[in-house]
Amino acid sequence: MSQSGIFFDNTGPGGVIQYLTGDVGGPIHPALGNVNILGGVNITATGTPLAHTLTLDLASTITVQQLNIDSMAGFTGSQSSQIQDAIQTVGAVPAALISLDVADGQMLTVKAYINGFKSTKDQCLGGEIFATFYRPTGGNVTMAGLEVSNVVTTSSADLDAVVSVGTQTARINVVGVNLETWNWVTTYSYMYLISEL
């Protein structure tokens, strides 16, 4: 639907009536004073009548693609996805902004863009991080070498890639600053090797 021209005004006995309009199909008259906007796959539509607002919430998964790779390549499949997520931290305790399960016999690469903003809006962090994780058959999740990161910050806030053997997860942690509240958001992508032959 286009941004401009979404509403169409018409004058009736009670005053101006607003209709929703789409890119095609013409005006949509409100039935009994209501215009129902329904969500769809990964979309939730929430109306707040007294505030005269409509909120459309998109699921955090932006794209998902699963490929069936020819068995001649040495494995049977791969999965990639791009996701956005957010958390808030208080203090300098590391917190998992991203946590991904790594199953027995799988490997995983993660690339994340991360923004951190102090709640008082006077300090910030912007960065990217890339890390590779794997879990040998019968073993524990392990990070391959060190992460590669590029961080620009006005404070001591930081980010890091780690593993959690207890939960067999690969994690990208953010670390705030002692006695400070930070808001963090990430857009990240990952790719799994699903299973070996």
Image (spheres, helix red, strand yellow):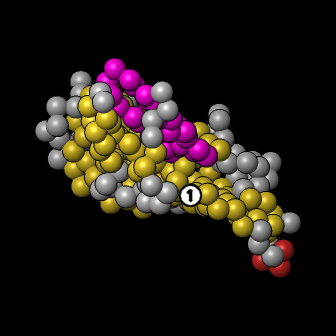
Q: Nearer the viewer, residue 123 or 53?
A: 53
The quadrant of the picture occupied by the C terminus is bottom right
Asked whether residue 44 is drawn in magenta, I would say yes
Q: Is residue 129 visible?
A: no
Picture layout, residue 132 above or below residue 28: below
Q: Nearer the viewer, residue 9 or 114?
A: 9
Spot occupied by residue 129 in the image (x, y as percentages of width and height): 41, 57
Q: Is residue 105 visible?
A: yes
Asked whether residue 139 is drawn in magenta, I would say no
Spot occupied by residue 181 in the image (x, y as percentages of width and height): 27, 28
The quadrant of the picture occupied by the N terminus is bottom left
Specify the segment rendered in magenta: 33-60
Residue located 22% across and 36% down the image: 118
Within 10 Å of disc 1 (Cα), the crowding (few <14, some 14-19, many 20+) is few
User: Picture quarter containing residue 116?
Assistant: top left
Q: Extreme top residue here?
A: 50
Residue located 38% across and 23% down the image: 49
Picture layout, residue 64 above or below residue 89: below
Q: Amino acid at mark 1?
A: Thr
Residue located 24% across and 24% down the image: 179
Q: Badge 1 is on which residue?
A: 63
Q: Is residue 183 left or right of residue 62?
A: left
Residue located 47% across and 60% down the image: 24
Picture layout, residue 87 above or below residue 195: above
Callout 1: SS: strand
Q: Nearer the viewer, residue 10 or 119?
A: 10
Spot occupied by residue 4 in the image (x, y as percentages of width and height): 29, 56
Q: Extreme bottom residue here?
A: 72
Q: Is residue 65 left or right of residue 160?
A: right
User: Picture quarter containing residue 66?
Assistant: bottom right
